[in-house]
Every structure is written in structure tokens, then in C-alpha cells.
């Protein structure tokens, strides 16, 4: 189930709850997209009326009246949250249908296109047969792919993936000493793999 709308009432005051309930009930009444709302609109209207009366009674500042107001507010808040879940389910992923309920839209996060990792640095490790690589992280990256070639870096056929990391550092092991090795890195995000970084080369000890 895709979340398209939200109740948005977790921090609402009792007066705000009444306003939200009144608006949503009005928008959903007779709305063919929501034939069997759960909870029912009638039950929400009943609790809304109870809360309106409780708000008025609580002006006396009597402890019992304030407690009754808070109880009615909690009940209505919970019912609106349940109704929002119903709307998300009944909308079948259609945001226009979901918004016709009167609830507010959930802000959808936008996917970020990856850029090439900058300032890739390959350097001799303190351990034999190893080269350490690091680079600044790329915003929105889920992981990084490390490519290596032992031959001419201008020949695309020689490059191969030698590591996939969620962090912006990598150590290549098992290398022959004093042999120049070239590396490049790409960032992978929600929209897929981005362009390659500049090439960096080093020799293992």
C-alpha cells in the first residue's frame, strides 16, 4: 500500500481536530471512491460532536471536564489516523483520489541523480599487496562501485568491478607489489549508477 496522504493530527489541538474532522467528513460524504470508510463517517461525526461539547464544558476548568475533553480528543485523533489508512488503501495508488478525501498529501521524497565521486585518492597501503582508496561521499548515494584495471585505463574493456561499498572507502587486497593499478568509482542511488570518477592510480607495497 502506497502512502499518499496522512492524517496529520498527531500534534493537533482539540479545536484543530474538530476542524479537520469536519472538513474530511464533508469531503468524503458521498465520495464514490470511498464507499465503505473505516471507521464510518457517522462514528467520526459522533465523536467530533462529543469533543465539541467537551471543549465547551472544559472552559469551566473542572478536572473531570478537562479529562473528558482529552479523552475525546485522543479517540478522535486515533479514528482519523485509522481513516487515513483506509483512504491510502482504497485509493489504489492514485494521488488524486486520495486527496479528494480532504486529508493532506504526504510529501514524496524526490530521487537524486548521482554525480561522479570527486577527488578519488588511491595510495599504497601499509599492508603488503594492498591499495587504499577513499573519496568524499555523494549526496543520495546508496552504495559505491569500485572499478579497477591492470592495463591501459583508456581501454574500456579492461575495467572490472572489484568492490561494492556503502562507505566511501575501500581497500583492494591481493595485488602484486610495485605494479601500477588504476581505479575509478561510481555512486549508485535511487535512479541507478552515476558517472565515473576521475581515475586514480597507485602501487602496492
Image (cartoon, rainbow, N blue to C red):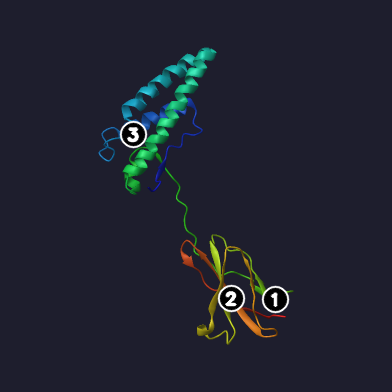
How far apart marks 2 and 3 lie (CA) works out to 55 Å
Residue 35 image position (x, y, % from top left): 26, 37
- Left or right of residue 205: residue 200: left
Residue 84 image position (x, y, % from top left): 39, 38
Mark 1 lies on residue:
123
Residue neighbourhood size for the residue with mark 2, other residues' Cα within 10 Å, grouped as few (<14), some (14–19), many (≥20): many
Instruction: Tell me the number on the disc at residue 184.
Output: 2
Residue at disc 1, secondary structure:
strand
Residue at disc 2, secondary structure:
strand
Residue at disc 3, secondary structure:
loop
User: In the image as oriented, which residue stretches furthest toward the right?
Assistant: 126
Mark 3 lies on residue:
38
Above or below, 204 relative to 94:
below
Q: For the point 54% across and 81% down, which residue is it?
A: 159
Q: For the point 62% across and 65% down, which residue is it?
A: 168
- Left or right of residue 205: residue 81: left
**Circles 2 and 1: CB atoms closer than 8 Å:** no
Amino acid at each position: 500500500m502506497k502512502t499518499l496522504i496522512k492524517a496529520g493530527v498527531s500534534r493537533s489541538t482539540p479545536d484543530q481536530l474538530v476542524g479537520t474532522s469536519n472538513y474530511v467528513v464533508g469531503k468524503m460524504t458521498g465520495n464514490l471512491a470511498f464507499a465503505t470508510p473505516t471507521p464510518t463517517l457517522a462514528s467520526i461525526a459522533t465523536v467530533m460532536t462529543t469533543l465539541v461539547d467537551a471543549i465547551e464544558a472544559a472552559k469551566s476548568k473542572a478536572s473531570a471536564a478537562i479529562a473528558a475533553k482529552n479523552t475525546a480528543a485522543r479517540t478522535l485523533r486515533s479514528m482519523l489516523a485509522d481513516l487515513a489508512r483506509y483512504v491510502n488503501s482504497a485509493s489504489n495508488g492514485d494521488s488524486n483520489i486520495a486527496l479528494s478525501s480532504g486529508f493532506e498529501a504526504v510529501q514524496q521524497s524526490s530521487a537524486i541523480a548521482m554525480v561522479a565521486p570527486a577527488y578519488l585518492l588511491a595510495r599504497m597501503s601499509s599492508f603488503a599487496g594492498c591499495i587504499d582508496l577513499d573519496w568524499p561521499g555523494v549526496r543520495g548515494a546508496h552504495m559505491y562501485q569500485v572499478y579497477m584495471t591492470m592495463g591501459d585505463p583508456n581501454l574500456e574493456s579492461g575495467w572490472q568491478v572489484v568492490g561494492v561499498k556503502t562507505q566511501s572507502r575501500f581497500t583492494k587486497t591481493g595485488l602484486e607489489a610495485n605494479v601500477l593499478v588504476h581505479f575509478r568509482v561510481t555512486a549508485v542511488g535511487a535512479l541507478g549508477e552515476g558517472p565515473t570518477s576521475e581515475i586514480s592510480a597507485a602501487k602496492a607495497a
